[in-house]
Image (cartoon, rainbow, N blue to C red):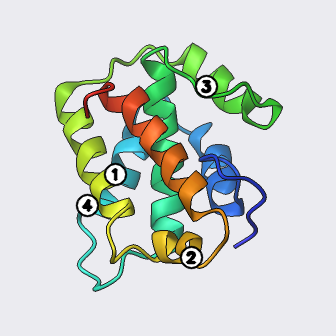
Amino acid sequence: MGTWALDAFGNDYAMDWAQDLHEYKTLELVETTLDNVIDSQEAELEAPFAAEALAALEVIARLQGKPGENDPATAEVDEWVAACKKKVTPPLLEKARQALDKIVAESSELRQLWQDSEHFTDWLADVAALRGRVLGQDA
C-alpha cells in the first residue's frame, strides 16, 4: 500500500475509494464500506478494507460539519460532501462505531502495519480524533 500520511486519505486505497465516491448520489458507498469491515469473517481484518473505511468515516465526519485538517488532496471529497443532501442517521453512526472498533482491534492488519512503524502512536491518535469527530468526544 502506498502510504504518505497518517490521515484517512493518506494512502492509495482511500484515494481510490474517494474517486469512486463521485459515482454515488447517496451514502450507499459509505455504508457498504463500513459493512465490509463489520461483516468481515476473516481472522484478520484486511488493511484495504480498514483504509477505505477510515475514508468513509472521514466523509461521515464532514457531513456532520466536523472535517479534519484542510487538505487540498480531499477537495473532490469536500465537493461531494457539499453536494450531498443526505443526513447521517443513528444506524449509520452505530455502524461507524462498530467499524472503528474493528479497525483499531489487535486483529486489524492496518493496525498491525502501523504498529510496526515508528508512527503507531500518532496513527492511533489520528484515529481517536476521527472517532471523536464522528461519534462525539465521549465516544
- Contact, mark 2 vs mark 4 (Cβ under 8 Å): no
Q: Which residue is mark 2?
A: 113
Judge left or right: residue 96 versus residue 90: right
Q: For the residue labelled by badge 2, is the local secondary structure a helix, a strand or a loop?
A: helix
Label 3 is placed on what type of residue?
Trp
Q: Which residue is mark 4?
A: 38
How far apart are labels 2 and 1 at the CA level?
16 Å
Q: Is residue 132 above or below residue 126?
A: above
Q: Position of residue 49 (x, y in %)?
A: 46, 65
Q: Which mark is residue 43?
A: none
Q: Amino acid at mark 4?
A: Ile
Q: Earlier in the sequence, mark 4 or mark 1?
A: 4
> Label 2 is placed on what type of residue?
Leu
Percent from the top left, x then y, of residue 84? Answer: 50, 19
Name above or below for residue 65 compared with residue 37.
above
SS under mark 1: helix
Mark 4, mark 3: which one is toward the viewer?
4
Q: Farthest residue toward the right?
A: 72
User: Mark 3 or mark 1, which is nearer the start of the sequence?
Assistant: 3
Q: Relative to the observer, which residue lies in front, 71 or 17?
A: 71
Q: Amino acid at mark 1?
A: Leu
Quarter in which the C terminus is drawn: top left
Cα distance between the residues tagged 4 and 1 = 9 Å
Residue holding disc 3 = 80
Q: Residue at x 24, y 24 (%)?
A: 89
In this rendering, which labeled residue sits more in front, label 4 or label 1? 1
Quadrant (top left, top right, bottom left, bottom right) of the N terminus: bottom right
From the image, tell me which residue sits under label 1.
100
In the foreground, 110 or 84:
110
Distance between the Cα atoms at labels 4 and 3?
Answer: 25 Å
